[in-house]
Amino acid sequence: MSDAPRKPLIALDDALATLLAQAAPLAGTETLPTAAARGRVLAADLISPLDVPPADNSAMDGYALRAADAAAPLPVTQRIPAGQVPGALPSGEAARIFTGAQLPAGADTVVMQEFAELADDGRLRVTQPVTRGQHVRLRGEDLKVGQTVLPAGTRLDAIALGLAATAGAAQLSVARRPRVAVFSTGDELVMPGEPLPPGAIYNSNRFTLRALLEGLGCEVIDLGIVPDRLDATRAALREAAARADVILTSGGVSVGEEDHLRPAVQAEGRLDLWAIAIKPGKPFAYGRVGEAHFIGLPGNPVSSLVTFLVLVRPFLLKLQGATRLAPRGYRLAAGFDWPRPDKRREFLRVRLDEAGGLALFANQSSGVLTSAYWADGLLDNPAGQAFKAGDAVRFLPFAELLA
């Protein structure tokens, strides 16, 4: 056994900073229909070419009038549905108006139809006090001409796409998708649907990682399961490097494992092995094969998931030029005691309870993927920090991490 001292564990924040320093945004953009741009990263500022709304309009079904005229009975001289350009409204008159319809010139107020009555003589009488400007949506109150609607680096979710459409954008310039090659090594791996021999396991990480990558807008190149031989592994790495920006694997790269992946990466490029001070997920590898980034995740399914979410996710977002890399965290009350914390930073699988606190999944093993399925997110606990039920802790919801 070697007497060489072990390298100290690297703090997660330091590892992330080192990793992000390697993630230069990819060159190239493409133009997509706005409807097809969900999950992509905006490559250029979107500037509004118009005011939204383009004219003052009614927020209610009712009657448009001058507030100063509201006390007197008023003849109703116009009917204004949405989409029609109305004529000017003279003083002393009212107009029947519908939600979204343009306010006629001269009108400054809308009275809800519930607070107006038409007398037998056809004149309008307002039954409630009127405030000037009520129920009027003003021109440009949502967007103004020349305003930045969405800045470059925005990840386009449903609301962002709706806002882009509000500004009339039929197409959007987005960053090129990272091409990520994924493959698995290990003769013990079997694909779901195949018989499971003694000693074999189903390859769950392949499905988890592929779904995570697609959710981040990546183009996935799935190279399948590579035979557990050095020559086959080196050939797979060369193919992946020729086709992808990033090579992503899980398992087989921690120190001391009898596996061909680590020597294959070292032979085809360079490899840094990091022992990160987190639980689960200590072993992590970063390197280069040709021009491609290589990232090796731990093999246990929860370790692979956690290290992807806290390290690989921000790396891939930065490759696309995204400006918000870190998930939002929230301070919530722990619903349990944690008297024996680990020396490493811990990511515990927890669920929101009905009181707004956090409940703990009983089995926190890195091999129990059920814990992540059950959970609403991760409790991010600093190294060595004990806490009691009721203490405030940091919660990272999966709604943020998987978005």
Image (cartoon, rainbow, N blue to C red):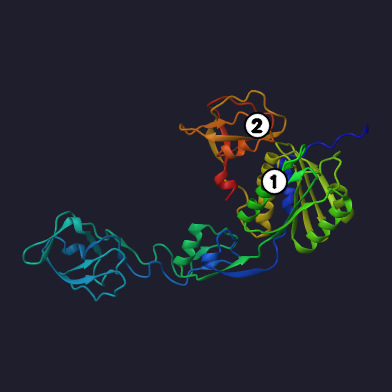
Q: Residue furthest front?
A: 195
Q: CA distance from mark 2 to mark 1?
A: 18 Å
Q: Quadrant of residue 78?
A: bottom left
In the rendered structure, find residue 364 and report the number of the disc placed on it.
2
Q: Amino acid at mark 2?
A: Gln
* Residue at screen point 69% across, 41% down: 301
**Within 10 Å of the Cα at label 2, are there few (<14), some (14-19), or many (20+) other Cα atoms?**
some
User: In this rendering, would 342 be left or right of 2?
Assistant: left
In the rendered image, residue 23, in percent from the top left (x then y), is placed at: 72, 56
The front one of 205 and 332 is 205
Q: Secondary structure at mark 1?
A: helix
* Residue at screen point 40% across, 67% down: 52
In the rendered image, residue 178, in percent from the top left (x then y), is placed at: 69, 60
User: In this rendering, would 34 be left or right of 261?
Assistant: left
In the rendered structure, find residue 205 and report the number of the disc placed on it.
1
**Within 10 Å of the Cα at label 1, are there few (<14), some (14-19), or many (20+) other Cα atoms?**
many
Q: Is residue 289 visible?
A: no
Q: Quadrant of the N terminus?
A: top right
In the rendered image, residue 164, in percent from the top left (x then y), is placed at: 49, 65
User: Which mark lies nearer to you, 2 or 1?
Assistant: 1
